[in-house]
Amino acid sequence: MSDRERDWDFYLRTVSNSARDSSFANDPASDPSLLHAVKKLCDFCRQEEKSSEDLVARVYPHINKLFQRSTASLSQPTSPNGILLLVILQFFLDFGEVVLHDADPSLRTFFRSCLSREFADPVVAAATLDFLNVNKNKLLFSFPNLLPQFFPLLLKLIAWNGEKLEKAFLKVFPGLVSPGSFLPLFPSLVDLPILVVALEKVERSSGSLIGSSIASIQKSAAPEMLLALMDEAYTGSTIGDGGGDSESEESSTIDVADPVFLELLKDENDGLAERHWTSPGVAAVLQAATNSPQSDRLKQILNITPRLLDMYFTIALRDANNSLICALIPILMARNSTLFPDKNYMYEVRRRLLEFMLASFQRSPDFIALLKKPIVDRLG
């Protein structure tokens, strides 16, 4: 037996044992040798041209079982699973046709079960964007609805991790835009600063965001538990204690069931939702943000968001049809007066809104007649 064959058998045995061994059943990623073994097996499958399909067929059942075990363990992880799952997903994308594996359910499971819990981990966030960029063409062609569906979750990557991921995120960003995400994506972009404020508030009240699925709160079957969890997240009080922490004066004015916060913290695109910026909860958070020193994370997103809007409007003028742009303009008009209260941010965003609307009217003058009522309402 050659050294190469011995290595193959060793790595395959490692993955096979981890996939079925009860000691790793709760969290396969806790085995430090496992990630290395999976990577090596994937390399073997790519390098062996003549026997590649046979190798893929041999390793696939073990890797698929390992993926299922890893995602099942995410509710109580002892270590991040994201890197391991991304390596397995790459295997599914590279060799799915050989073993007739549809990667779509696996990709969606990764977003819902893993990334929703680990978006705040900088290593997992960076690796996710690298994975999306490497497979950009394949994802857009084979799974065109995937990124548009999960754009709220992907926005959390840039909101939480900031400028160090901006370059990679900008490469992924065009894939987030589709006819179904075009309209709801705009308010989510403009509201990135308040998303940062909301996430930071959850972290201060409930600890690290890594390992807990924030968006799952709003899917609770019991309304009472929803209120209790949101109360704990936003006020720091535990269920039933009626108390608060040192921030209680600020937090006690927040409506814990405010739909705007549930809308901000969601992971998936469920259409265009009205955001009631006059609600007491939002007003309290904006007032608190205005009166408090800005965090580094907030400062970064205030700088990043106008650049994301530049790309969004460029894509809009290039790819969006007239119906979508005509529907977008009233939203721009409405949001012009409801922006995060930072002087420079408001200036930069309003300048871009105005430039886009002027470009749209110049390209399609008939918009003026079609949008006469919202224009008159705003002027009046």
Image (tube, rainbow, N blue to C red):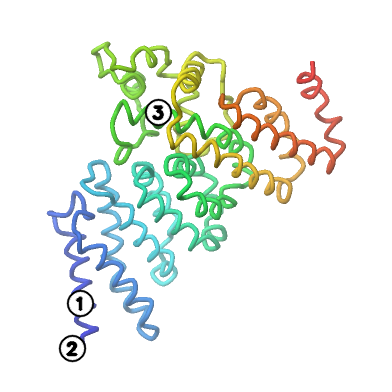
Q: Which residue is under mark 3?
A: 218
- Checking the image for residue 1, the label placed there is 2
In-front residue for pair 342/88: 342
Left or right of 282? Residue 23 is left
Q: Residue furthest left?
A: 23
* Residue type (three-letter) at the residue carrying disc 2: Met
Indicate the secondary structure of the residue bearing disc 3. Answer: helix
Residue drawn at (33%, 71%) of the image: 42
Q: Position of residue 138 (x, y in %)?
A: 52, 63
Q: Secondary structure at mark 2?
A: loop
- Among the two numbered marks 2 and 1 on one chain, the one whose residue lies closer to the N terminus: 2
In the image: residue 203, left or right of residue 262: left
* Mark 3 → mark 1, Cα distance in angstroms: 46 Å
- Residue at image position (54%, 36%) is 302
The vertical placement of 150 against 221, above or below, is below
Which circle's residue, 3 or 2, is located before the other in the chain?
2
Q: Which residue is mark 1?
A: 9
Residue 114: x and y, percent? 34, 47
Res 324 quadrant in image = top right
Count of marks placed on residues: 3
The amino acid type found where label 1 is placed reads: Asp
Left or right: 273 as drawn, with respect to 377: left
Q: Quadrant of the C terminus?
A: top right
Tell me whether circle 2 and circle 1 mark residues in contact (CB < 8 Å).
yes
Q: Residue furthest bottom?
A: 1
Looking at the image, tell me whether mark 3 or mark 1 is earlier in sequence order: 1
Judge the density around disc 2: few (<14), some (14-19), many (≥20) Cα neighbours within 10 Å: few
Q: Quote the CA–CA distance across marks 2 and 1.
A: 10 Å
